[in-house]
Amino acid sequence: MENKYIERYIYAVTKRLPLKMQGDVAKELRANIDDMLGTDNPTDDQVKEVLQKLGHPRKLAASYLGEGHYVVAPEYYADYISTLKLVGIIFLIVSLVTGFISAVTLAADQDIWQAVEILVDELFSDIWTKALLAFALVTIGFWIYGEAQKKHQPKAWELKDLPELPKPNTLKIKKGGTIAELIIATSLGLAFVVLLQFGLPYFDQDVVNTFLPFFYFSIALDIAVGSLQLIFGEWRWPVVGVYTFSKLYSVFLAYFFLYSPFLNATWVGEQAVLAGGTYEEVSAGIEMGLHVLFAVIAVATIIELVQLWVRVIKAQLAGK
Amino acid sequence: MDETILNNLVGELKRGTQVLAVLAHLHRGQYGYSLLQDLSSQGVMIEAGTLYPLLRRLESQGLLKSDWDTSETRPRKYYTLSPDGVATFEALKKQWQMLTDDMNAVLKEKENGK
């Protein structure tokens, strides 16, 4: 007599097998179960006992499939994880940089709050899609590579293929330097904010006030970066990430501040009188100066970040 | 002593001998359940869920051949050693004897405190 649990068990096993195996395994499994039961009219309890003895259908199916069915084989697992990390980081940088560029382009004529909204939107809108894409690409890559390797004899390896030992401490952050930087950056930042807040004649107070929270945040970021550097003591990914973010944030803030009407028009007018030129001439001169200032800040920051990233990625690759 | 670790180690030791035990019993044709009973009557503990897939695997490797017997009320699949299986079994048996000799020597040496 056919028992519904037996048929369901056999189905649970065979549905996990390739089509060409299914029929034969089902037939054999049914015969084996009948033999184990030893009776044509088993009770549900007897059926239960026999099926429990055979084990979980998933496990039994895996035994029928044999060993070695992996998306990423164990011997490649460590390489897979480190590649995932590296590719993840590269994707993150690319999406941060492209997001940043498109945000700056889009936000050029907006006020600072709208600009921040656009920035957040651009940076994070499709970061998950990109992260998933990176994950999928690496996984598929390893799967294809693993499958291809199965068909080859294991390659002989040479001693010269062994990785070089990483240079010690290339990523070390000097404590003294960090503390000095932290103190200088914080005090200069605070001095600047105080200067803005207590209304010097050459600033337009309304415009400056809008920017104050952003400058405070910038100081907080500097402190966070300094603290992370001290805690970790070397350029680990969290430190590099927060540092990069704080630098990009500074450039972003500099852009919006320097291109905002933060200068007091009356003061500019007075300067024009003192210099003996027209308002337009002086204002154009100041604008020119601000362009140069921003360009210097942006270029210096980018060079610094690129150097840091190259150094960190190099050390990561060498350490692999 | 950690019982779990010990059980795992014993399991590993036994797993290595399962194929040899199965091949040793298949000079004459046997179906899955009869082989299972045969083995367990000799103290070779192998689970049904391990044995049935193992038989198929050995067949796909060419060490066993199989036939369905449908003459009785219950159809049964009988496995026997193929000529290649016989040769493999003999070679494996020899390896096993060498291995046990070596291991006995190693363990004896330790016992004598050398």
Image: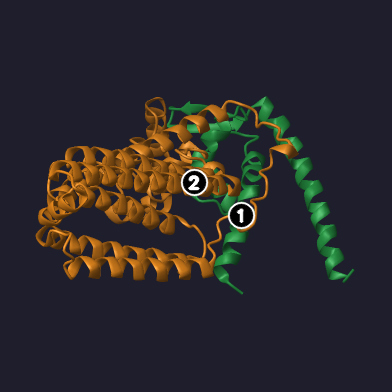
Identify residue for label 2: A307
**Residue at the image position 50 percent from the left and 44 percent from the top:** A310
**Residue at the image position 84 percent from the left and 64 percent from the top:** B108
Instruction: Locate residue A32, reporting x and y percent.
Output: 43, 41
Chain on which label 1 sits: B
Report the disc number at residue A97: none
Instruction: Locate residue B74, reporting x and y percent.
Output: 40, 35
Q: Are marks 1 and 2 on the same chain?
A: no
Instruction: Name the side, left or right, on which A177 lies relative to A162.
Output: left
Identify residue for label 1: B12
Looking at the rendered structure, the kind of residue marked 2 is Gln
**Residue at the image position 54 percent from the left and 67 percent from the top:** B4
Query: Would you say the residues marked 1 and 2 are in contact, meaning their CB atoms lie under 8 Å apart?
Result: no
Colour of the chain lettered A? orange
**Residue at the image position 61 percent from the left and 54 percent from the top:** B12
Colour of the chain lettered B? green
Front residue of A206 and A13: A206
Secondary structure, mark 2, is: helix
Q: Quadrant of residue B88?
A: top right
Residue A144 visible in the picture: yes
Chain on which label 2 sits: A
Secondary structure, mark 1, is: helix
